[in-house]
Amino acid sequence: MFAGVRRILFDLSGTLHIENQLLPGALEALAEAKAAGLAVDFVSNTSKEGRSDLLSRLASLGIEPEPGRLHTSLSVTADAANRLGLRRPLLLLSESAAADFQVEPGGADFDSVVVGLAPDKLNYQDLSRAMRLLLDRPEAPLLAAHRGRYLRSGDGLLRLGPGPFVTALEFACGRSAQAFGKPTPAFF
Amino acid sequence: MASHLLRSAKGLLCDISGVLYDPDGSGGRLIEGSIEAVKRLKDARFPLKFVTNESQTTRAGLTAKLQHLGFSVTEEDILSPVTAVRAVLKERNWKAHLLVHEDCLPELQDVAATAADPVDCVVLGDASDGFSYAALNAAFQRLMTPAARGGGQPVGLLSLGMGRYYRQAEQLHLDVGAFARALEFASGSTVEVVGKPSAAFFGAGVKALGLDGAAAVVMVGDDIVSDVGGAMAAGLLGVQVRTGKFRPSADEPHPSVTPTAYVDDLKQLVDILLN
């Protein structure tokens, strides 16, 4: 079944590590894949940290993606924003994640909304502001890093992902978001 | 045709916010002609109840606010989802995790669970800044645990209305419906609506007017989906005002709701009803 496989995509959080803990067998699996001559890519829906912080965290665990082999929902979303010519996104993202986006200064003249996992920004005032923008500008896209419903954090408790907040904005504004990241076919 | 239907109407359910006054974060701003319109209806003894999804305050608080603005109303004139949900919870003998505006907590004291109690349901109201990530997360975690009443029952999700947004102090703000949908999506629960646009809530309004035919009752409101659409789906006549959160570009015409009539304001409607 796997005879013709040339490339393997490794999910990160929950598969190779949870936060700052490697999962058993993770490094061994990566070593085996490389030894077998497979191309190794890493895919992640993480939208809480930007590329730079994520690479640092992975390096501290002994995971070093080759250049261009780390694909996150944030990087795919940022690429899409560029292709769509969006220069002034209203970012409901952590500071770390926001660093992956190019934002032209322009005060409050936003042309789109981007939603990721950002507990600090997913508050009533910021969400209402995003809603007003989307209602006032029907042509401004609503982009979602991904629609994850929830995740289990290091302490074992469930935490809401960005998906429910995307749903809230879609419902309030009567329109649909474009979601990137897993499980969209385009991401893979 | 529409005026004929309205002239033979026997009762009125009247939305408050966006019809009587516009909320502005404090005392509220009167909508012109509304005080006189209400007075005319009362003087003519026209069956009248106010139906609101207002859940940022108690019924007593809302009555005081309206009286302060000059309206001749009493608590009994008002049907609110806070009062309705308390009745539902007492009837079911349920305890609730409340994510509601702090000002309506006094009215819900005897159905509220403490942090340590297991719960039967989560109740969502118009919590405003109370809709923080942490508070929504806490409500979500409750939805993912078994209910207090046992038997493998899921924790219920009750919402005081399903509004998308409301107008306050010149701006639109997210309403409880958006957060109800968010928690439905996160947990897989199905929300039970207490308040507009639930047909049961409109039915209770028709009964409270002392009438038994919904078709002879008019509901007037500023939310074309929740107020007008919801009422018409329950068999009432639905009138959309051009005040409050009404948006001409989106609401007239509306892609899915065709009101019985559009009026500029409550005054214009009452002129039709009483003449």
Image (tube, coloured by chain):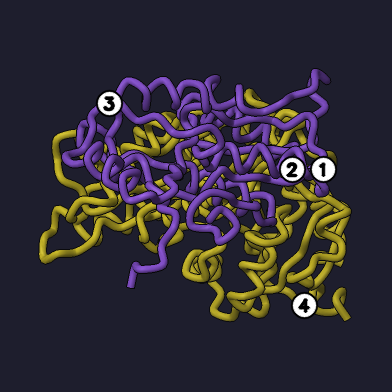
Chain colours: A purple, B yellow
Q: Mark 4, chain letter?
A: B
Q: Which of A110/B271 is in front?
A: A110
For badge 2, the amino acid type reads Leu
Residue at x 68% of width, y 40% of height: A79
Q: Mark 3 packing: few (<14 Cα in 10 Å), some, or many (20+)?
A: few
Foreground mark, 4 or 2? 2
Q: Mark 2 packing: few (<14 Cα in 10 Å), some, or many (20+)?
A: many
For badge 3, the amino acid type reads Asn
Q: Which residue is mark 2?
A: A134
Asked if disc 2 and disc 1 are in contact, CB closer than 8 Å, the reply is yes
Residue at x 61% of width, y 54% of height: A171
Residue at x 52% of width, y 54% of height: B161
Count of marks overlaid on the render? 4
Q: Mark 4 packing: few (<14 Cα in 10 Å), some, or many (20+)?
A: some
Q: Is residue B206 left or right of residue B71?
A: left
CA separation in Å, label 4 and label 3: 71 Å
Of mark 2 and mark 3, the one earlier in the sequence is 3
Q: Which mark is residue A20?
A: 3
Q: Mark 3, chain letter?
A: A
Q: Which residue is mark 4?
A: B8
Q: Position of residue B160 (x, y in %)?
A: 46, 51
Foreground mark, 3 or 1? 3
Foreground mark, 2 or 3? 3
Q: Which mark is residue A137?
A: 1
Residue A112 occupies quadrant = top right
Whether residue B272 is visible to the viewer of this picture, yes or no, is no
